[in-house]
Image (spheres, rainbow, N blue to C red):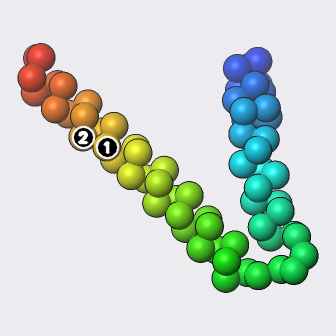
Amino acid sequence: MRYGDILILGIVFAPIYLMLLGWFLGRPRDLRLALIGVGYMTAITVGMWGGLALFAAVLKVVFF
């Protein structure tokens, strides 16, 4: 594993890992609310990736 992978996956994503652990292992435990949070995070991530893919396609059409 390269140093950049360790930096991103271990240090930069640490708050996300801690948030997920808090949602699923914290007290009082509300599984429905934790799954809603995971759903929101997934939707935001997919929306950002989709938007970037669309933007890249537009740039390809405009400049090439």
Q: Position of residue 11 (x, y in %)?
A: 79, 32
Q: Which residue is mark 1?
A: 51
- Residue furthest to the front in view is 28
Image quadrant for the C terminus? top left
Q: Secondary structure at mark 2?
A: helix
Q: Residues within 10 Å of mark 2 (few under 14, many from 20)?
A: few
Give the quarter of the image for residue 38: bottom right
Q: Secondary structure at mark 1?
A: helix
Q: Please tell me the numbered disc located at residue 20.
A: none
- Residue furthest to the right in view is 27
Q: Residue at x 10, y 27 (%)?
A: 61
Q: Position of residue 31 (x, y in %)?
A: 73, 81
Q: Residue at x 55, y 67 (%)?
A: 39
Give the quarter of the image for residue 30: bottom right
Which kind of residue does numbered mark 2 sit on? Leu
Q: Residues within 10 Å of mark 1 (few under 14, many from 20)?
A: few
Whether 26 is drawn above or below 61: the answer is: below
* Left or right, 48 with reference to 6: left
Image quadrant for the N terminus? top right
In space, the residues marked 1 and 2 are separated at their CA atoms by: 5 Å
Which kind of residue does numbered mark 1 sit on? Gly
Q: Residue at x 83, y 80 (%)?
A: 29
Q: Residue at x 48, y 50 (%)?
A: 45
Q: Position of residue 16 (x, y in %)?
A: 72, 48
Q: Position of residue 20 (x, y in %)?
A: 75, 59
Label 1–label 2 contact, CB within 8 A: yes
* Left or right, 60 with reference to 7: left
Q: Which residue is mark 2?
A: 54
Whether 30 is drawn above or below 13: the answer is: below
